Image (cartoon, rainbow, N blue to C red):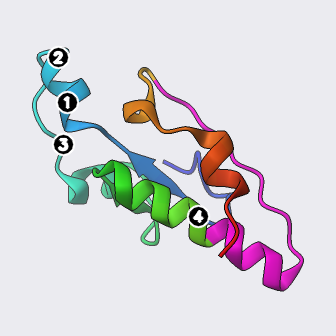
Amino acid sequence: AGSMNAADDAIVYFSHHALNLKGLPNLDPTTVKKYFARNDVNIIDEKTQLEQKVNKLVADSASTGKPVFLLLMSSGTFDGIDWNAVSSRQN
């Protein structure tokens, strides 16, 4: 709780595939949100949704002039997302 309070946009991503490989149960987004104690945290479990969300943040920063800094922490590979490609896309 509180670990992402300083973030303007908080996102928690989990991969069903990674959980399955590790023999872990699926995560309930409501429970995940509760433990971060932040009502506006985005819980995402689809690779394309995560790419779209980050792409939107990058695109929005171009119009506002506010830079985007991503802190990515993982015990996996984010399902193989190419972060250089995602973060450099222009809409």
Q: Assess disc 1: are there few (<14), some (14-19) or many (≥20) residues with their C-alpha within 10 Å of its C-alpha.
A: few
Amino acid type, mark 4:
Asn
Residue at image position (50%, 65%) is: 53
Instruction: Name the element at disc 4.
Output: helix
Is 65 in the magenta? yes
Give the residue number, with chain letter if any, for mark 4: 55
**Which of pointers 3 and 4 lies earlier in the amino acid sequence?**
3
**Which of pointers 3 and 2 lies earlier in the amino acid sequence?**
2
Residue at image position (56%, 51%) is: 2
Q: Residue 69 at what x, y percent from top left?
A: 77, 52
Q: Is residue 71 visible?
A: no
- Name the quadrant of the C terminus: bottom right
Q: Nearer the viewer, mark 2 or mark 4?
A: 4
Instruction: Name the element at disc 1.
Output: helix
Amino acid type, mark 1:
His
Q: Nearer the viewer, mark 3 or mark 2?
A: 2
Residue 27, numbered label: 3
Q: Bounds of the magenta span?
A: 57-74
**The furthest residue to the bottom:** 63
Q: Assess disc 4: are there few (<14), some (14-19) or many (≥20) residues with their C-alpha within 10 Å of its C-alpha.
A: many
Foreground residue among 14 and 5: 14
Q: CA distance from mark 4 to mark 1?
A: 23 Å
Foreground residue among 1 and 20: 20
Give the residue number, with chain letter if any, for mark 1: 17
Give the residue number, with chain letter if any, for mark 2: 21
Asked whether, in this view, residue 56 is left or right of residue 11, the answer is: right
